[in-house]
Structures are given as structure tokens and as C-alpha cells.
Amino acid sequence: MQFTVPPMHALVGISSLLFLFPFTLLAQESGKKEPHTKWTMLFNGEDLSGWHKQSKRGQHGTGGNWGVTQDGILFGEQDPPGSGNGGLLLTDETFDEFELEISLKPDWGPDSGIFVRTDEKGAGWQIYVDHHDHGNVGHIRLETKPYSVPFRPFGFSRIDPAKPPLEMAVDSRTTDWPDNVYEQLCTQEEWLSVWKTDDWNDIRIRVTGGHLPTIETWVNGLKCCRFDATETSHPKFDAEKAKEVTLPEGSIALQVHGGKNWKAGQRVYWKDIRVRRL
């Protein structure tokens, strides 16, 4: 009986396959792309490394005033305080699909926001952080100077600023809304049960999809909303107009709203800002 020995290069190839096979199976079973699962801190708690004020004047001003407290907290206010001049602080890095986690503690009165896929004028998709009467936190707005649309289902008010509890208020602009402006939406009562008026609150944001994104938000663990710009039935939203004024990839940004809503001394505070690409 004769035995045929495979050539050496064939044996090396077979052994390589046998060595890689278990790891290939593990990668397939996990379904994870390892380079995109790691969280990266966007704020180091010491300075504004990795961030910059918008490089072009936008609809809210030249950029606002930003700094870091002695306790390592990032803050934003108008520049100078109470002047009406606001703007955005942008990440140097740009993102298309990602998850963001951030903690915030806004004073009562300021109008702020978290922006995604933002350009150098501070225009993009906004997650509301309007901590004032008739305000909203956690829902979506398209905000650019040429074209803006509020997707704001309800708001809240505070009868006496000295007392923490809020009460919900219907937004009059929603009276002509069909049912599917959002794919998912929490109730007013659910939102009110988790928000902490004078304390730190955790926001999670997930952005996926192409030029017209799907944006999901959570407030202190509550699923606040899921918004799909390709499917929304908002009566005043025009997808083609939105494509003309938005980016498929851009900075993550924090907002100081322009105008007289901000009083001198009022700030919004941010910490524990981290992101992971999807």
C-alpha cells in the first residue's frame, strides 16, 4: 500500500485554516465588529481638547463661551454672558453612525441642545435640551438656517421655579400631526416620571442610516423616541429639502442658543461624554 504525502505548502495551508477556524466561528457567532465596539471618551475632564467652537458664524452667533470648572465639568453660556450671542461647541472628529452617552445638568431657563451630523455653522439634527417653560428634552428637531422643522410632541412648564416638580404641556404645533411622525414615542407621564429637574440626567443617542438618519433617544433609561427621517409623516417635513441642508456625516455638538432667553450667570453643564461608532 502506498501513501501520498501532500506537498509542504499544502500542509501549511491546511494548518493555517485549522488554526483560524475556531476564531472565525467565534467572530461569526458574536456578530460584532471589534474595532467599532469600543467606547471613546470625548471629554477628558480637564480642557477642551478634541473640541472647537464653530468656525463660521451661524444663526445663534459666533459660538458661545465654553470652559471647564475646577470639578472637571464642561459648561456653556452666552458670550459674553447674557449678551444674546450663542453658538455651538463641536467635536474635531466627525461621525456618521454612532451611539453617544452624555450626562447633563441644565440651569432652569436656558435653551440648549445636542446636535448630530453638524456642520461648521452649527446646523444639523438636534436633540432638544430646552430647560424652560414650554420646553422639551429628548425629542428631535431639524435645525438649519435655510430650513428647520420641529418634531416636538409635547413640552413641560414650571409654575414656580423654586419648586422642582414640572407639569406637562401639549405643544400646539402637534394638533395636525398624523399618528406616525415618530416610530416610537414615550408618553408625557413616562417622561415626567424619570426627569430630574435640579440634578444630573443621562441621555443616550443612537444615530444610524444614510443621509436621512434614524435617531433614537433615551432619557435616564427611558426610551424617549425613535425617529426615522425617511418614514416620518410630519406634514411640514420635506425629505428633499432636508437632504440639501444636512450632512451624512458631521460633528457632535453642544448648543448655547442665541437670543435673550439666557440670563447672565445661567449655564448648561455636561460630563461623562463618550461615543462608539456603529
Image: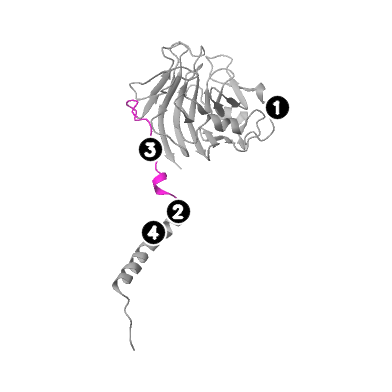
The kind of residue on which mark 4 rests is Phe
Q: Earlier in the sequence, mark 3 or mark 4?
A: 4
In this rendering, the label closer to the viewer, 1 or 2: 1
Residue 154 is a magenta residue: no
Q: Earlier in the sequence, mark 1 or mark 2?
A: 2
**Badge 2 local density, few (<14 within 10 Å), some, or many (20+)?**
few
Indicate which disc residue 30 carries: 2
Determine the residue positioned at 37% across, 27% down: 51
The boundaries of the magenta stretch are 32-49
Q: Residue 185: image x %, image y %? A: 61, 34
Indicate which disc residue 40 carries: 3
Q: In the image, 231: left or right of 95? A: right
The kind of residue on which mark 2 rests is Ser
Q: Which residue is mark 1?
A: 176
Discs 1, 2 touching: Cβ within 8 Å: no
Q: Earlier in the sequence, mark 3 or mark 2?
A: 2
Residue 259 visible: yes
Cα distance in 3D space between marks 4 and 2: 11 Å
Cα distance in 3D space between marks 4 and 1: 55 Å
Question: In the figure, residue 189 lies in which quadrant?
Answer: top right
Q: Earlier in the sequence, mark 1 or mark 3?
A: 3
Depicted 261 relative to depicted 276: above or below: above
**Badge 4 local density, few (<14 within 10 Å), some, or many (20+)?**
few
Cα distance in 3D space between marks 3 and 4: 26 Å
Q: Earlier in the sequence, mark 4 or mark 2?
A: 4
Q: Nearer the viewer, residue 223 or 113?
A: 113
- Which SS class for mark 3? strand
Determine the residue positioned at 51% across, 25% down: 196
The kind of residue on which mark 1 rests is Asp
Residue 41 is a magenta residue: yes
Q: Residue 256: image x %, image y %? A: 46, 20
